Amino acid sequence: MGLRSYIITRILLTIPTLLLLLSMVFLFMRVLPGDPVYLHFEKKATPEQVEQMRHLLGLDKPLWTQYIDYLLGLVNFRYFLQHGYPNLGKSMQNYEPVGGQVFSAFPATLELAIYSMLIASVMGILLGVISSKSYNSVLDHLIRGLGTIAYAIPVFFLGIMFQLIFGVYLHWLPTGLRINPNVQPPAHITGLYTLDSLLEGNLFKFFESLKALLLPSLTLGIVLSGMFIRLTRTNMLETLRLDFVTAARARGLKESTVTYGYALRNAFLPILTMMGLQFAMLLGGAILTETTFSWPGLGSYIVSRINYRDYTAIQGAVVMFGLFVTLVSLVVDILYAYFDPRIRL
Amino acid sequence: MNEVKIKRSILARLIPRLTSLTKRGPSGWMIIVGIVIVSALVIMTVIGPYVSPHDPSAILVGPIRAPPSLQFPMGTNHLGQDMLSRVLCGGSIMLQVAAFSVLICFIIGVPIGLFSSYVGGFFDSACSLVIDALYAFPGLVIAIAIAAMLGPGVINMALSIAVVYIPSYFRIVRSQVLSIKELAYVEAARASGSKWYTILFRYIFPNVIPSIVVVVTINFADAILTAAGLTFIGLGVAVNIPDWGWDLTKGRELIASGTWWVITFPGIMIILLALGFTFIGEGLSELLNPKLQR
């Protein structure tokens, strides 16, 4: 099977996964005990108000019709082209389309996710390699200990500690928001502030947004790096024992070439797979990090909607997270097939 | 008399096993340290209400937001509650939630995994497809969605966390059973006319237990962190019970004034608890990983 047909099959396989995922979200939000409309009003509404909201949101229809409407809304391309976002229903709080709110919050989460992933993978892989090279030494135990502690820290606790040290005591870095409130955010091109300000050619805005990004992405990156350290270490330990590494050394190659050019290259594939899986965990951590740093992304959106008991909005945001994760795992699988031709066989 | 005898015999069997761990190198020590941390925290939570200097829920036992001093070694919070007492008693909700969620995961995930891989065929494929979709989803997002629908409460919180971790149990059990069921002794059992449930639960299940133990300990750590996360975003158990997660959440609002003690001490407790379980899990998985044994 060539790379192209592998990609096509993989994309086709995404459809049942997505369908399953969307159905599960629907199941969780609609079939679990607890009527969303009643919960929204906290039992303080008249029957007429409840009926009216049911009708406006289409919740008075039979469950099957609702389910079909929900799926059709997502694949309605005409709606998507008209509005620039998919039809995810309307918010229970203000009857505005959830799709629009979710799409405008998404770039903030994406930007945080990209930078945290960068920090986590660079830190994790580097420390993991160093740890495996000095197997069973003090340095190895130290790095492993650090990795384990990083894994056990609640991400919001680390975030608050950073805010306390770098924001409250030292006044070095901002403790919230995507950019200094006195600075006009860059024009919306991609929605990623660092990229947009570079496209605008405004270095000042670039550094301002980078400064705001530093603490949140460091927080999330450090917590995630624990898993990366452990993974890289285990994979490198296994690879460093293989014959081809010994052979490379015997040929008199530099140790750094053997480690990074030969061993890490081969240990990298399982790490890449884990990166894809970790992405789901990263998004979970992003919700907490966003809440800690008042970062206006999808996570903050969900949390603020929980306070309003806005169930349609929560459902829309959950769907968005699901779509995002599915897309990332698709990309990771394709990358994997590209790097490792055995997968395509 | 009889009871004492039994207890001693269990202890007598357990202690040599624990001491033999010291001969297993760093992984063995990790397990021991983990067990010590976890048991210390569990004991602290159990006896906490009897030894804490103040009522952990009583407000204004001291001045508001007093920094740590001799009288209040961990300071007081914005309600004038004694933080030391709250730290001593605050683990109970988290431990309960974690224990219930692990129990639910075990009761649901393990039998489905055993059965699905043993039967194979369409049932297995269907189960795997659903579980894989669930596994790929951001765990905290599912937990939030379910917890928001179910409302507050220890069991509800445990349920919403359990849904996230059932896939881990299913996957590990399934992959183990797939290789075990092909072994000769299982075939022998089948040939001698054993019923399928006898084969599954008496012959296959015991061999899966070591891998499940690793998952259980790591699941404990994850459940604790998830419970803390759910509390942090406002989906915790909203009652007048001291809880580390709740203290962290409230303490966050106080840091602007430099009040570090309200979050630091409960936070360290959560880290220690999660760390203890992670140590046990990591040590066990390293001991059981044949690839890393020289």
Image (spheres, coloured by chain):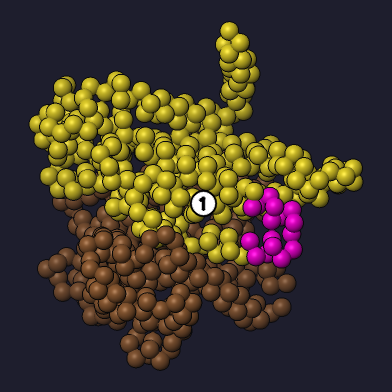
Chain colours: A brown, B yellow
Q: Is residue B240 above or below residue B137?
A: above
Decide if residue B224 is in sight here.
no
Amino acid at dot 1? Tyr
Q: Main secondary structure of the magenta part?
A: helix
Residue at position x 31%, y 56% in the image? A289
Q: Is residue A165 left or right of residue B146?
A: left
Viewer-nearest residue: B239 or A130 = B239
Q: Is residue A39 visible?
A: yes
Q: Identify the magenta region.
A: B112-127
Specify whether residue A203 is painted magenta. no
Foreground of the two, B209 or B278: B209
Q: Quadrant of the C terminus of chain A?
A: bottom right
Q: Secondary structure at mark 1?
A: helix
Residue at screen point 57% across, 11% down: B4
Residue found farthest to the front: A47
Q: Where does residue B51 sit, x and y in percent of width and height?
A: 29, 20
- Coordinates of residue A203 in the picture (x, y in percent): 22, 72
Q: Is residue A294 above or below residue A72?
A: above
Disc 1 target residue: B165
Q: Residue furthest top?
A: B1
Report the residue that reaches farthest toward the left: B63
Name the residue rendered at 42%, 67% in the picture: A30
The relative height of residue B92 versus residue B245 in the rendered view (above or below) is above
Give the residue drawn at x 52%, y 27%.
Answer: B32
Quadrant containing the N terminus of chain A is bottom right
- Relative placement, left or right, of A134 versus A69 is right
The relative height of residue A272 versus residue B252 in the rendered view (above or below) is below
Percent of width and height locating residue A330: 54, 72
